[in-house]
Amino acid sequence: MMVELLPFAQSLVHYSLHLLAPGLIAWVFFRGRWKRAWLIMLATMLVDLDHLFAWPDVFVPDRCGIGFHPLHSYPAIGVYAAGCFVRQVRIPAIGLLFHMVTDFQDCVWMACLSRM
């Protein structure tokens, strides 16, 4: 029974991290403009449009996007990390970097589930 709930829990954690955690980050670090910061971080989910360039299948539920999709590549992640130190792009950079962390934890979770 517990094993059957794990994929549901994985999805719940994954999408909560994508939607709710940026709001918490925005509220903690950008309190005076947290709503705007949250919306900007939510907009960084458009980075997932790079999934459309995946070949041969656009969506594969058990494929790890980190290192596979162009905007989820390690060089791109390095650019996002560097952007955290540039005031003008800090909020989207944090959103993109947190998006990558969220996707990475999902990859780890998928690897663990595949061993069960």
Image: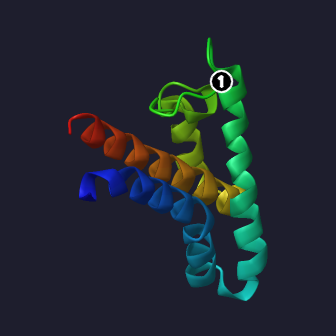
Nearest the camera: 54 or 8?
Answer: 8
The residue type indicated by label 1 comes to Val
Q: Is residue 24 left or right of residue 64?
A: right
Give the image location of residue 76, x and y in percent.
58, 34
Q: Nearer the viewer, residue 93 or 24?
A: 24
Quarter holding residue 50:
top right
Here the colouring is rainbow
Q: Is residue 30 visible?
A: yes
Give the left or right position of residue 96, taking residue 114 as reference: right
Q: For this view, does 50 lie left or right of residue 103?
A: right
User: Where 57 falls versus 48 (above or below)?
Assistant: above
- Structural crowding at the residue carrying mark 1, measured as other residues with C-alpha within 10 Å and reported as few (<14), some (14–19) or many (≥20): few
Image quadrant containing the N terminus: bottom left
Q: Secondary structure at mark 1?
A: loop
Q: Residue at x 62, y 18 (%)?
A: 57
Quadrant of the rendering where the C terminus is positioned: top left
Q: Quadrant of residue 64?
A: top left
Residue at the (45%, 61%) spot, across then down? 13
Residue 3: x %, y % from top left:
26, 52
Identify the residue at image location x=48%, y=53%.
Answer: 102
Q: Position of residue 2 (x, y in %)?
A: 26, 59
Of residues 50 and 63, which is closer to you in this image? 63
Residue at x-position 40% and y-position 59%: 9
Quarter of image, res 43: bottom right
In the image, farthest residue toward the left: 116
The answer to whether 116 is drawn above or below residue 86 in the figure is above
Q: Residue furthest front?
A: 1
Q: Residue furthest top?
A: 56
- The residue beneath circle 1 is 58
Is residue 90 placed above or below 46 in the rendered structure? below
| Residue 81: x %, y % from top left | 53, 49
